[in-house]
Image: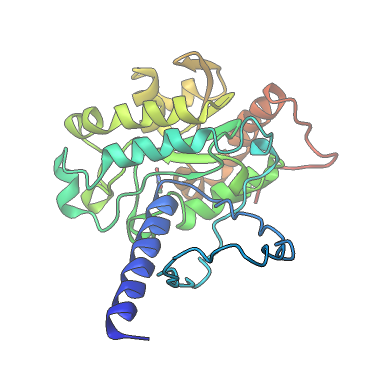
Amino acid sequence: MSDERKEAVRQVAGELARHLAWLRDAGVREVPVPVPVMRRAPVPAPALSPAPALEVRPLPVAAPRPLAPIVEQGPAATSASQKGSGSPGLLAIRADLGDCRRCKLAGGRTTLVFGVGAPRAELMFVGEGPGADEDLQGEPFVGKGGQLLTKMIEAMGYRREQVYIANVVKCRPPGNRDPEPDEIEACEPFLRRQIEAVGPKVIVALGKFAAHTLLRSTIPITRLRGQWSEYQGVKLMPTFHPAYLLRSPAEKVKAWEDLKLVMAALGRQVAPGGGRPG
Ligand code: URA
């Protein structure tokens, strides 16, 4: 292969890798792969037909390494009408965010943490903002609190990939301080659009900060939790933040009560003997 052709292959492979990374950032966890079409045996050409004057060139397409598993969509997102219909919306939002510099959090972030999960999930969790682990990995709730959130999700009968998870702010506040009003103002429109694009039946607001932002309330989370509210016409259940539950394990009982209300609203049954997540 000529050097020119090798360079072209390298460029296409690079483009593809960047595109797939961008899709993953946008929360897309499934990439449709065209089913190979079986070729028919060539029909012999009439003996006297003139050969077309075509220059035959190999396509400059590199065979990329398979991506790290883009997590599959689960049943909550598998109906034909849903499949993919959420993704273009999320992709457009991610594209609008771009290399966001709308607030001062941009200067301190490693990675913008957009969201993750099924693009048409019936259940969506909204947290506060990325911590150190999330900032490094580009995915919400992957640290210790995230591990507990995953257990909570699984105790509700879902896999993590079947729900959608996002935060009020997409960039890590320095030292994990609370996001400030100008930062929320800059970021919240994107969360609102994410919620519209995913179209969940229920939102769970994780912790005081997410609940206060979404509900425009200052009522303590201890009073908000366990009570149905609404955000833009979507049922919203505030509950304790997983990080708080790690510090105050006795409160897990109350959080589990809240999640059971959510399960009931989604028509899910608690497994017999199904207790709260560890
Ligand atoms: N806490 C949050 O609120 N969100 C995350 O993504 C991680 C920790």
Residue at 19% x, 45% y is 105
Q: Is residue 7 above or below residue 70?
A: below
Residue at 33% x, 78% y is 5
**Rendering colour mode:** rainbow
Residue at 31% x, 72% y is 8
Q: Is residue 215 above or below residue 165?
A: above
Find residue 167 and report its image quarter.
Answer: top left
- 157 relative to 26 in the view: left or right: right
- 102 relative to 191 in the view: left or right: left
Q: Is residue 218 above or below residue 81?
A: above
- 131 relative to 39 in the view: left or right: left
Q: Residue furthest front?
A: 48
**The N terminus lies in which quarter of the figure?**
bottom left
What is the x, y in percent for residue 16?
39, 62
- 43 relative to 122 in the view: left or right: right
Residue at 21% x, 51% y is 174
Nearer to us in this view, 121 or 229: 121
Labels in figure, total: 0
Nearer to us in this view, 247 or 105: 105
What is the x, y in percent for residue 193?
38, 27
What is the x, y in percent for residue 110?
25, 58
What is the x, y in percent for residue 18?
35, 60
Nearer to us in this view, 190 or 238: 190
